[in-house]
Amino acid sequence: MTGAGMTPINGLSVDVEDWFQVGAFENVIDRADWDSLDRRVERNCDTILRMFDDAGVKGTFFTLGWVAQRHPEMMRRIAGEGHEIASHGWDHARVFALGEKAFAEDIAKARDVLEQTSGSAVTGYRAPSFSIDARTPWAHEVLAEQGYAYSSSVAPINHDHYGWREAPRFAFRPVQGADFIEIPVTTAELAGRRMAAGGGGFFRLLPYGVSRWAIRQVNERDGRPAVFYFHPWEIDPEQPRQSHAPLKSRFRHYTNLDVMAGKLRRLVGEFRWGRMDDLAAIEAVRTA
């Protein structure tokens, strides 16, 4: 909380990756072809920056090193407008697919490029597809060893692509003796069941009122900040279509792209939002 009787400031975050880098298409689009595809991430991020500026909010842009390397001016704009630059890894490889050594190399490479292009220190990390889970007990230790202050990489739910259901719902210290904290993406509770409520497809596919209810539950009943995320490609209905992707992947990826920007404008205007590093500092005190 930020003061007696005040609603918590929620964490607003953007996972900066292009339309062809998403997990849904990882078996359809070859990484070797990425540079030949239409890169739309910069124009979409410019739209997001205008949206945030109109609402008077600051957020965190968890950015792939691959993207930062190719869009250095975008990185400088984001940082120059007062938003946090944080790491989303190098090229969206899932943590459990990398292994400990490759993961350490991946985050070090990404951080170097992010800091060089943005001119700002990188202290936060979000795993691609929330892929820190029960299979990767070493991942938080590697992040702490490299000097990261926080991660927002755990989804404490059951999901067909990710999830660590046994993890705490709210910020916790996963590395004994370290100041490093993990801030899971938001979940809500309904009839004794835990459900995803932190953005992404949940926010885009379901009615706006469901997200409002979930964030209010976390803020008002639990007295805790929510952590919300979305992707630049989610506000881009004109992006190329992948007709060869599985039907389920296409449904999840393309549904309601045309209404996402309007829903986001409503969301950022209705709740209190801030950068993830500021939220991490507050949660570090709470969990000390």
Image (cartoon, helix red, strand yellow):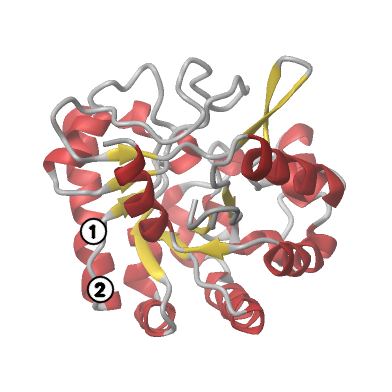
Which of 133/20 is in front?
A: 133
In the rendering, at what x and y percent does residue 147 appear? Answer: 15, 48
Q: Residue furthest front?
A: 4
Give the amino acid at mark 1: Arg
Above or below for 180 versus 6: above
* Alpha carbons under labels 2 and 1: distance apart: 10 Å
Q: Give whichever of discs 2 and 1 has the lower sequence position.
A: 1
Quarter of image, res 161: top right
Which of 105/181 is in front?
A: 181
Residue at 45%, 21% in the rendered image: 167
Disc marking residue 32: none
Task: Say left or right for 205 vs 28.
Answer: right
Residue on which the image places disc 1: 111
Q: In what element is the residue under mark 2?
A: loop
Quarter of image, res 144: top left
Residue at 42%, 54% in the rendered image: 279
In the rendering, at what x and y percent does residue 256 appear? Answer: 83, 54
Whether residue 172 is visible here, answered yes or no, is yes
Residue at 37%, 73% in the rendered image: 70
In the rendering, at what x and y percent does residue 244 appear? Answer: 72, 42
Task: Say left or right for 51 vs 26.
Answer: right
Residue on which the image places disc 2: 120
**Numbered disc in front, either 2 or 1:** 2
Q: In what element is the residue under mark 1?
A: helix
Which of 18/88 is in front?
A: 88
Above or below for 68 versus 50: above
Can you say which quadrant of the picture contains the C terminus? top left
Q: Residues within 10 Å of mark 1 (few under 14, many from 20)?
A: many
Task: Say left or right for 223 vs 30.
Answer: right
Whether residue 90 is visible here, answered yes or no, is no
Above or below for 172 versus 104: above
